[in-house]
Each structure stands twice: as C-alpha cells, then as structure tokens.
Image (tube, coloured by chain):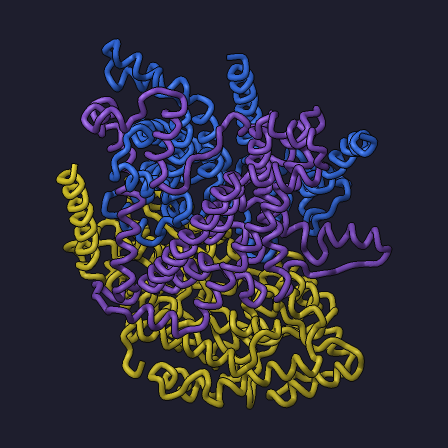
Amino acid sequence: MTVFADTPGPGSLRGKRRGGSNRRDYRRIGVPGPANRGIKAERSAYPSWFLWPAFAILGVFFLLPTVLNFVYAFTNWSAYHDGVDFVGWQNFEALLGNGDVLIALRTTLIWAVLVAVLQNVFGFALALFFERDSRINRASRAIFFIPVLISPLAIGYIFQALLKPDGALNGMLGGVLGQSVSIAWLGDTTWTIVVVSIVQSWKWMGLSMLIYLAGLKSIPEDVLEAAKIDGASWWRTLRSVRFPLLAPAVTFNVATALLGSMNGFDTVQATTKGGPAGTTEVLNIFIYRTFGQGLYAQATTMSLILFLVVILLAFPIIWALRRREKQLL
Amino acid sequence: MKASTFVKAATLAAAASLIFTGCATGGGGGSATNGKAVWNEPTASLEGVTLTFGGGAVSDAGLTQVMDAFSEATGAKFEKVAYPDPYEQSLLTKVAVGDMPDLAAWQPTASQLTTLQPSKNLLSLDDAPWLDDLDPAVKDVTGFVGDTRYAALVTSPSVMGVYYNKGLFAQYGITEDPANWDEFIADAQSIKDQGGVPFYEAGGDMWPTQWWPQVQLAEQAQDGLWERVNTNEEQFTSPAILDAITEYKSLIDDGLFNADIKTATVIDQANAVLTGEAAMAVQVNALLLQMQSVSDTETIDANVGWFPISQDGNIATSIPDNKNGVVAFHTGDAEQEAAAAQFLNFWMTDGYADYIEAANAVSIKPDVQSPAGVPEVAKLISASLGTSVGSMQSLAVANADLYLNMAKMIQGTQTPEQVAEATQRQFAGLAQAQGLDGF
Amino acid sequence: MKTTRLTRGIQPILAILACLLVIGIPLYLLVITSFKSDAEAQVPDLSLPTTWHIAENYGRAISDGDVLGGLFGSLLVTVPSVFGVLVLGSAASWVLARRSSKLMGLLYSVGISGIILPPAVVTMVLTLQSLGLDGTALGMIGVYMGMFMATAIFFTTGFVRNIPVELEEAARIDGASPFKVYVRIVLPLLRPVIATAAILVTLSVWNEVFYAFFVLSGSGASTLPLNLFNVASQSEYVKNWNLIFAYVVLMSIPMVVTFIIAQRRIVAGVTAGAVK
C-alpha cells in the first residue's frame, strides 16, 4: 500500500481546464453539471467567504512580498545610506553586465535540470522495482521514503562527511580496490555539481517513487488485461501502455522537481557552500551573499530575476507536459 | 464581484506603498539620543536592564566570563543572540529593517563597519574613558570610519604573517628569518630542492588565499595604495595588485605548495605546520587558534615560529577580525545605550584582567599582564603591530570577494587577470552603492 | 513465465541489497558516528566506535544544541501552519472546484502558483517588519502559510473535482447551509487528501531553514533546523560530526514517527474506500 495510492491524481497545474472537464464528467454520469445551475445558485451554494481567509494569507505573505520585489529592484536600497530612491534599470544593467549573475543563473539551470532528470529516473525505476505488493517491497518503499523526512540541511551534512577526501565512501572504495582512494567528490570544478545533484535526488527520489507508484496503481486492471491478452511483453506494456498513462504523474514530478530546484539552497549550502571555485553557486546562495554585502536592492533584483526566470520556464514546460498528457491519454 | 476585486487590489497597492514609504524615511522615527555614548561608572547598578549581544554561534570563553562578571557587578542581564553563520550577514538583515541588538561582536575594520551605516546605527566611542590606557601601538590601529571611532578593540588584532615549523627550518639549514620577499622565496626554493614541502595553503577553505597578495603589498599600502583604490585612481587590475596575484599563482605553478592545495582545510594547514608536514604557511591568528585547539602551549612553542614578511622587509599587515572588536548600537533608547556603553567600559577597565585571562589572549593594556598560557607566537604577533600597516579590509572602503576569486584561480578556472577584473568589478559595485566619488 | 518466476526469486534479494547500500550506508554513518568520541568522529568512517559515547553525545546535543527549545519552536511554528493551511486551503478549494466563473479560474491559478514560484525572501522580511511580526513565531507561521497554501489548494481542488456533486445537492435540498454542507458532507470525504497534503506540508515546514534564517534568526524563537545550523557552525574549522549527527537523529525522530502513524491511517483509509 502506498502513501498516495488513494489520491486520484493531483489537480491540474493549469486553471482554465476546470469548468469544461467538470461539465464533461457530469454529462457522462447523467446529472446536471454546475454550468446548468446558473451563476446565482452557484454563488449561494458555494459562498465567496470560503475563499477569503486563504487568499488573505496568500495576499499578505506571498503576493505582497512579490509585488514589493518589483518595486525594490528599481531602487538603490542598501546598507550604506538612508532612504531609498528609484534608480530605474541601474541594478539590472549592473547585474547583467556582470558575468557572475549569468554564471549563477546557468549553474542554477544545470542544477535544476540534473535534479529533475535524476530524481525522476531514480524515482520511476524504484517505483517499477518495488511495484509488486510484497512485504519486502512495502518495507523497502518506507525505507526509501526516510530521506524525504530528514531535513535537507542534515542530508547535506551526512553527505559532506560521506564524501570527504578521507571520508567513508573513499574508505569503502579503497577497501574494494585494495589501495587508498582520496577522490575529492565535493572538490571538483566540473563534476561536483553532478555529485550534489545526486545528493538532492537521493533525498527526494522516495517522493517521486510514491507518486509514480500511485500512478501505476491507478491504471485500470482491464487495460493491463487487454495488453496481456494481446501478448505484449512486460517492456512493451510498460512503454506503450503504462508509461503513457502515467503522464499526469510525470507532469507533476518533473514540474515540481525542476521548478522547485530553481529555488534550491540548503543542500548546496550544507555540502559545498557553492564551491569549489563557485561552480555550484546557485542563485539563492548568490542572493544570500549579495545581501550579506549590504547590497539589498541588488539582492532583491536577483530575487526578481529568479522569479521571472521561473515564470518564463514554467509556462512552456507545463504547457508542453500538459500537451503531452493530452496526446497520450 | 468586480468591485470587490478592485477594492482588494487597491488595498494591496496601498499596503505596498505604505511599506515602501515607511522604509524610505529610514524607519527609525525620531530618536531621543544623539549617537554619542554616555559614560557611566563601570559598576553602577543596572538592575532590571537586559542587554542583547549579537554574535555568531562560536562559543567564546572570554565573552562569557566578562558578561557574567558584569551581571554580578551591576545586576544587568544579558540575552545572547546567536545569528547563524556567517552571522554578519544575518545581523545585517536585521539591521536593514531596523531591528538591532544593543551590542555585537564585529570586525572593527572600516569596510565592515561601513556596512552597518555607522553614522546612523552605531554609537561613537570617541571619548571612551579607557583609550589612554591602551598600548599605543594598537590603540589607533583600527575601529574607525573616517575620523570617528565606532568599534572597541578588546584583544590584540589579528596579523598576517608566516608561521613556520622550527624543526624543518633547522633541518633545511635556515637559521635566520628571511629579511624580504626574495629571501623568503629563496628559502622556499631551497626547501623544495631538498625534497620538502615549502608552503601549505588551505585552498579548500578559500579565505586564507587572500593573505598572499596582501602581504606583498604592505609597503605600497603604507604608501597609500588603498586610498588610491578608494578613489579609483588605482584598481585591482593595476600592476601593483595584479603583480602580487600573479606572483602567488606562479609560486603555485612552481610547485612550492602542498599537492592537495585545492581541497586542504585550515585544520590540515595547522596540523601540517605543527607536525612538520610542510615548512610554512601565510596566515592570520586564526591558524594559531586552531593549533591551540588541537595542541598545548608547550608543543606550539617548541615547534612553531612566526615572522612577518613584506616585499622589501618585514612589515606586518594587521587584519582585525570579529573577535577583536565590539560595537554598540544607536538604538534610540537612552537607557539601553548608556548600559551598553557601561558594559564596554567595565570590559575594558575593571573587568579586563579577568577577561584576558579567560580568553587566554594577549593583553592590549600595558598595565594588564597577558596570561601565562599564551604561546610565544602570540606575543611575537602582538609585538609586530607597532610597525604594522592596515590590510585591504582595514583601509579599503569595501571588502570585495577577493578570496573567492583567488580560490577560483587555485582551482584553475580563472587567470590572475580575471581575478583582478572580477574583484575590481565587485569593488566598484560596492563603492557605487556607497555613493563614492570616482565610481 | 520462467523469467517472471526468476525475477520474483531474485527481486527480494536485490530489494534488500538496494535498501542496505543506497539508504542503509548513509544512515548507518549518521547513527554510528553519533555514538563516537570527539576524536574518532573527526574522520567519520563506517567502523564501530572503540568507545561508546551515546549518553554523553546525545546529552551534549540536547543541552548545547537546545533541542528542547528548537523542538518547542518547531512545534509552535509547524502545528498552526499546517492546521491553518489545511483548514483555510481546503475550504477555498471546495469553492474553487465547484464554481465555474473566469475569476475562479484566475484565483485558482494564483492560489497554486506558490507550488512553483519562489517566494520573495528579501521583501518578505520588510513586509513582516511593517506588520510588526518580524522575528516572531506568528510571522513565521504567516510566511509558511503563504508558502504552502498552494500545496493544500492544489491537492484538495483536484480531489474535490472528483467527488460527485449529488451528495451535496441532496443535503442542500434538505435546507442545509453551505457551511453545514461543507463540514458535514465534504470535509469527511476529503480526509485522505488532507492526510496527504498534511504530510507534504508538515515535511516542508518542519525542515525549512532558508526563510527561517531571514525571519527568525536573531530573535528569541528558534527551530530545530536553525539550531542544527548553529550546532554545525559551533566551531569555525572543525566539525564535531558526533554532535551534529546526534542532533540530526534527535530532530528526525518526530518526523519518522509521524510518518509511520500517518501511513497506517492512509492505508486504513484506502481499504475502507475499496470496501464501499
């Protein structure tokens, strides 16, 4: 039994589909859909005051800071002087003219893509591997979920200890190879970003696994029976029947892993602090550092750039994933 | 429905502008005090007063002692506010929105003090009663922004210099401290030729890398290098600084450093010099502290020596750190400000002898003896301050991330020219934010 | 058929191996190092401790790292945030899922945007300051509710859309008020999805540290991850892995226990659903 097996798939990542899909569902089961009831009846049955508390919280603690981001990015707010004046595009010019931000942005993108790919590959492989409901598999799923429960900061420290040049991993490799190994896993300017992505994926693959498992379990038996009767092999059934039916789970997992990692901080901070030579310095570490130098407006501008990049990525990615769902389902 | 959405949007916009203007006027509101510290008797009663003291998570025996003693003498209470490291960043976050402690441990250099907007946020310590009792050699070394003293120096400031292993020097036939840079490098070359490791650098920790160019620049710093950098007459890309960076790079390329320079840490560095794995390390007092944490005074005295080095001689470069200085904040509450100043006064007068004993540090007051457990090296370092010159951190108006760029050079991703360019770009950005002329 | 039987024979062995190697080794390193002396923990490896320092290390972690203060702070922040997000979020989701105007579509998009959009950390501190909530548990709760409301809305709205509307209509025809319909009819049906959302939000809030840095550091309030960061930074150069890891073990226990309990409840919920 899985944690999410009872969730009939998460909601839509897009807002517009809702009315239409509802109407279709109700027509099918032969009862009048909401659209047939008229707006007035709908409003009195589902009053707006149910919405306000949640949206008040969202407004003050999520939207307002975001709006302020757009304001303060155009000012000279800093630790060095009183008062805040508008300076137009100056912060953007300074930051984009300075290669460091673009490098941090590139690092962030590489990191997010690596995490999204690795976490989903690991998670999907685990879901297939532990699919059958045996006692060992059920226990294994729970065990693979443990890293999800532990704080990313703590995970970072564990792997820092594991991956030190004189750490446990090199010790084990040395034991296997019969000679001393002192690879600096977290000290390589090319590969450390991959190592840290693997650590992040290790932490979250249990969650991806459960979501894929929930998806696999929700595939109707008759579909699989039909494939079996047609004589399709396990691999063929997976490729042309089961994987396509997992499209909503793929959408959710890929979108949240990719876009969530854009806002990453703690695992990187706890393993490398952005090093070696800044090759793992994601944007949030850069923001934290800039803020520490007292350049508040610049830190705000970077935060805004991050926000805009995530939006720019989110629309095409979610659009593409949703289109894929429609084509497959 | 439309109307209520509009009202909501308008409310949001109003709230936004409220916050914006609130901050634009400085946030502080009218303040009853003028930013100059008031000096009461060190032991006057402070029953019912609670002072907040900001600092990092690193525990400090000396600080704990002096707080306890002050509480005992005056009845004041302390609330230690530990910010996550690097705590300077966290503390700045709070100061940015007007949320200040009464006191904080702070690096007393001009560049670091400037980030706190001292004229607005800090108490001036110009008339502090203990100043005349300080060792003249260190009294005015640091703690100023412009001509105003904003930080109290509580221990002997950190100094950049060369730590060496005495046994190895004897083994390789080096009997005298090198008298200038050329002799220093010649000694290193000789050690290498005899099969030893001359220098040990902790590239994995990154920050020690910035001492190498700075010690080479001591004479030029005396000659006003950083003042010229502050006015943009010279840059990090000018020959003076760029050459010092290039020299460091060429020493690495010549194989004068430990093989694991990219990943070694300060712990490794301290062990290497202490045990004779490598002959020398250019470092600040932090290295000695690390040695003290793994060894005892006797062993350190027997194995480790120290000398300052510069291009043409032996001028030391001083770099006070966040354990050397304390600032008091201009919170606008006269009672709290007076109590904070009184604590500093107690610390540096009545309480100083016990403090320096608990901190096991070199005294900066001639009438207070340094504790017996202080290593010889610490005394050498303190003695070098008389003829020392300020570091980049002390004399430049902003502290650009020179060390991060240097670390990239060690990792092989940047050339000395790129290090200089990147550092200059950051420096100019910080100078611009301060509104300095020439940027 | 042959291959299936073969893989069925090998699969359990491989499963156990995967658990041991992939999850077991890091967790073993975590636990075994937390039992070691200061000196042995300097270079953390997989060997057994020569002398066991369990009580000493965990005692020091509790006193030096202020585990109890952190636990109190974490509970103080997590419980109201999760509760608030679920109560307010599921109520909003019900209306969002049932009403079909364009405005609702827009509100839904705004409501779930927080799942992928990064909250603005710098200006968040400013907002809290102007509300007088900076450095307070209440401010932190607000920030977390703002951050994770999206998760609750996203999951519950998707779930509500799959609940047939007739149940509610029957009650409404009997004259029940919307509030009654929601509490008596809808809320009980939402139990499984609320459990799922509760796990996700609890996990996120309990382990969050980046925003806590900005909001809580320097105030009296603290949380377990913030204290962990302090424990790990206690000495500038040396990492006392034994203490850090003792702390990690202690702070992870509540989550692991919660997980076991929550998983059982969900399993029960699914079985009940299958019987219907």
B185 is higher (above) or lower (below) than A290: below
* Chain depicted in purple: A
Quadrant of res C81: top left
Residue A298, given in percent of the width and then of the height, sits at: 34, 64
Residue B13, given in percent of the width and then of the height, sits at: 18, 49
Total labels drawn: 0
Q: Nearer the viewer, residue B188 or C202?
A: C202
Residue B2, given in percent of the width and then of the height, sits at: 15, 40
> Could one spot residue A236 in this view of the protein?
yes
Q: Nearer the viewer, residue B110 or A45?
A: A45
> Could one spot residue B128 in this view of the protein?
no
**Picture residue at 35% right of the left edge, 81% below the top:** B230
Q: Nearer the viewer, residue A293 or A63?
A: A63
Q: Colour of chain B?
A: yellow
Quadrant location of the N terminus of chain A in the rendered image? top right
Residue A272, given in percent of the width and then of the height, sits at: 57, 57
Q: As drawn, is C127 to the left or to the right of B89?
A: left
Quadrant of res A178: bottom right
Q: Residue furthest top?
A: C174
Q: Nearer the viewer, residue B250 or A303?
A: A303
Q: Residue furthest right?
A: A178
**Picture residue at 39% right of the left edge, 57% below the top:** A312
**Picture residue at 25% right of the left edge, 64% below the top:** A75
* Chain depicted in blue: C
Q: As drawn, is B306 to the left or to the right of C214?
A: right
A184 is higher (above) or lower (below) than C130: below
Quadrant of res B149: bottom left
**Picture residue at 52% right of the left edge, 39% below the top:** A249
